[in-house]
Image (cartoon, grey):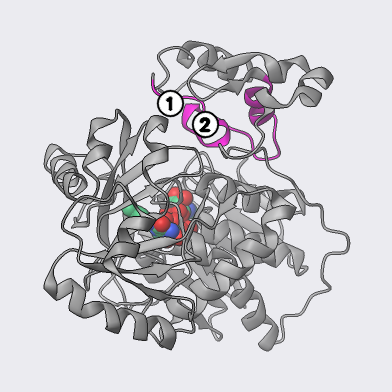
Amino acid sequence: MSYPASSPQGVFDVAVIGAGAVGSATASALVRAGFRVVLLEASSDVGSGTSKANTAIWHTGFDAKPGTVEARLVARGYQLLAEHADEFNWPLERVGAVLVAWNADQLSRLDAIRASALAVGYSRIQTLTLDQVYAHEPHLGPGALGGLLVPDEGLLDPWTITLALATDAVRNGATLQTRAPVDAAVRRADTWSLSWPTGTTQARWVVNAAGLRSDTINRLLGFDGFSITPRRGQLIVFDKFARDLVQHIVLPVPTATTKGVLVSPTVYGNVLLGPTAEDLTDRTATQTTLDGLTGLLDHGARIMPALLETEVTATYAGLRAATEHSDYCYQVHADAHYVCAGGIRSTGISSCLAIAEDVVRQLAELGEVPAPLRDPVTTAMPNLAEARLRPYQDSAAIMRDPAYGALICLCERVSQGEVRDALSAAVPAVDLDGLRRRTRALTGRCQGFHCGASLQAMLSAAGHDVDE
Ligand SMILES: Cc1cc2nc3c(=O)[nH]c(=O)nc-3n(C[C@H](O)[C@H](O)[C@H](O)COP(=O)(O)OP(=O)(O)OC[C@H]3O[C@@H](n4cnc5c(N)ncnc54)[C@H](O)[C@@H]3O)c2cc1C
């Protein structure tokens, strides 16, 4: 049989569709467990779907609905992210969250939120007096009535986590096939054939981690039971000068459909205000809108008026893979050799390692127990966190390699060495957006005005067409 150029050959044990946080984590766990894995990604880079545009909270799962798959997997995923943080060098900051009630109705719901947290196994939640609320967050606007402290909620770096897991999968033997938007699937003699416009591959098992398209893939594989309604979340990124205003993640009292608008620091040193929650039909509608941003500023004026006196660096939007169900659409179809990890809506960065662990466990229970990989390679990722040593601050690194001392992005202090590394990594950047997520270049105050042309030149020199 002859294959088109982009067809990974042979029969893999598992084909994972979608290289977001969930698919990359699953591919990594499967490869380490000894499976032959192909990771199929529609776009030209990993982590370019919802996993790149979210609120970047390291959720404990304290507010998950008791008894749901999501509650179990977020709590476990929280732990697993911490356990693997040193190995992969991804930053986690346990800053804690203050959940604030702004009216009598919200105040009356605090006890129920606390009871629900206890029911999902999170016991460190505390009731705060009004004085304590303001002591925790001195810049909070007037009018708060009470609150809760969730000391373990934290911040994560969704870009690095996803990239680390995809890199781990690839360096330990998975085949990554980008530009592979799977659009056909046939199962014959216990083997799935998956195709896309320029290629095809075969595998005994399929994992659907296609995010916003997970319902489409589910149907392609002969199943039904959920439909994705993209729920857009718009966010405003405030300048690094705003960082000192916010000590914790400032949460609202959640509603049935959304966790609500929060104010949160980021590991990159900025402050976020958002997200909105808008149900749409267009699965590509990641643009921000005047109404959305205006609404956020209204919320911000109430939550933390001083924040609005600082400068806005950027705005962005992500789409949650919401469904008609109030839980993940996570199911193993043993007879079909199919695992659906779809509809992972609001918490999937936090839970991705637990989903991956669970997939491996469930396959093992079905008798799929290859010999685990001996001596897996571990990749320590470049640090993007503001609170840790960055290459431009690391005199030993600069002595070894002066490229780490040559700044290319002055706003975010990204060096030529980091850009060079991102272009030659095991899962390299192939466009400006990929460079942004691997280095922080282009994300700062000037939004690439200073460094854009230099980055384009480095991309071109590395053989990539410039797409921005
Ligand atoms: C506004 C917002 C705020 C959020 N805040 C948080 C938060 O604070 N903390 C948290 O943990 N989570 C948060 N989330 C949720 C989190 O971002 C998602 O749950 C997570 O990114 C889902 O990962 P995924 O891998 O399932 O999907 P994605 O990252 O979307 O990955 C799916 C991949 O599948 C690919 N794909 C699609 N169709 C095909 C096909 N046919 N063939 C091949 N590939 C295909 C896509 O290109 C994409 O790369 C938030 C989400 C949003 C939108």
Three-letter residue code for mark 2: Arg
Q: Are marks 2 and 1 in contact (CB under 8 Å)?
A: yes
Pick the quarter of the image with the C terminus.
top left
Residue at image mark 2: 440
Residue drawn 41% across and 61% down?
A: 97
Residue drawn 58% across and 37% down?
A: 384
Residues packed near mark 1 inside 10 Å, few (<14), some (14 to 19) or many (20 plus):
many
Q: Secondary structure at mark 2?
A: loop
- Residue 196 place in picture, x, y as percent: 48, 51
Residue at image mark 1: 444
Vertical order, 126 against 1 (above or below): below
Where does the magenta region start and end? 417-445
Name the foreground residue: 71 vs 178.
71
Ligand number 1: quarter of image: bottom left
Q: Is residue 440 magenta?
A: yes
Question: Which of the 4 image quarters holds residue 130?
Answer: bottom left
